[in-house]
Image (tube, grey):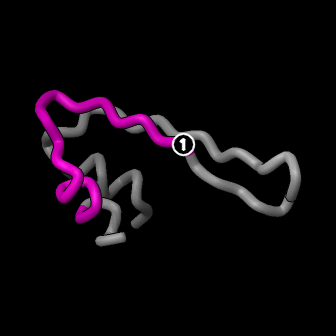
Amino acid sequence: MNWSYRLLENNKVDKVFYVVERDKGDWTNKHVHMLIETNRDLSYKETRIALGNI
């Protein structure tokens, strides 16, 4: 199961939108931007747990 499905299992999360972007200086390096739509406040701790305790 990937991290987006783990986030969506939380009943506070309605939608997850993410984009993978490559760095201009190093085309082999990628990073992710993520937006999370919630119906209630979601703490930083809850987010970390949902992402697999990163």
| Foreground residue among 25 and 8 | 25
Total marks shown come to: 1
List x then y, in percent, for residue 40.
11, 31
Q: Quadrant of the C terminus?
A: bottom left
Q: Compared to 42, does 29 lie above or below?
A: below
- Give the residue drawn at x 83%, y 62%: 28
Q: Does 46 sit left or right of 27 as displayed?
A: left
Q: Compared to 20, does 15 lie above or below?
A: above
| Foreground residue among 39 and 29 | 29
- Give the residue drawn at x 22%, y 32%: 38
SS for callout 1: strand
List x then y, in percent, for residue 26.
86, 58
Magenta region includes residue 45: yes
Q: Amino acid at mark 1?
A: His
Q: Does 3 sit left or right of 49 as displayed?
A: right
- Give the residue drawn at x 47%, y 35%: 17
Q: Compared to 7, does 33 lie above or below?
A: above
Q: Does 20 sit left or right of 27 as displayed?
A: left
Residue at numbered disc 1: 33
List x then y, in percent, for residue 43.
17, 48
Give the residues in magenta.
33-49
List x then y, in percent, for residue 34.
47, 41
Q: Does 5 sit left or right of 22 as displayed?
A: left
Magenta region includes residue 8: no
Q: Quadrant of the N terminus?
A: bottom left
Answer few, some or many: residues within 10 Å of disc 1's Cα (few below 14, many 20 plus, some between 14 and 19).
Answer: few
Please identify the residue farthest to the bottom as the structure is shown: 53
- Give the residue drawn at x 32%, y 70%: 52
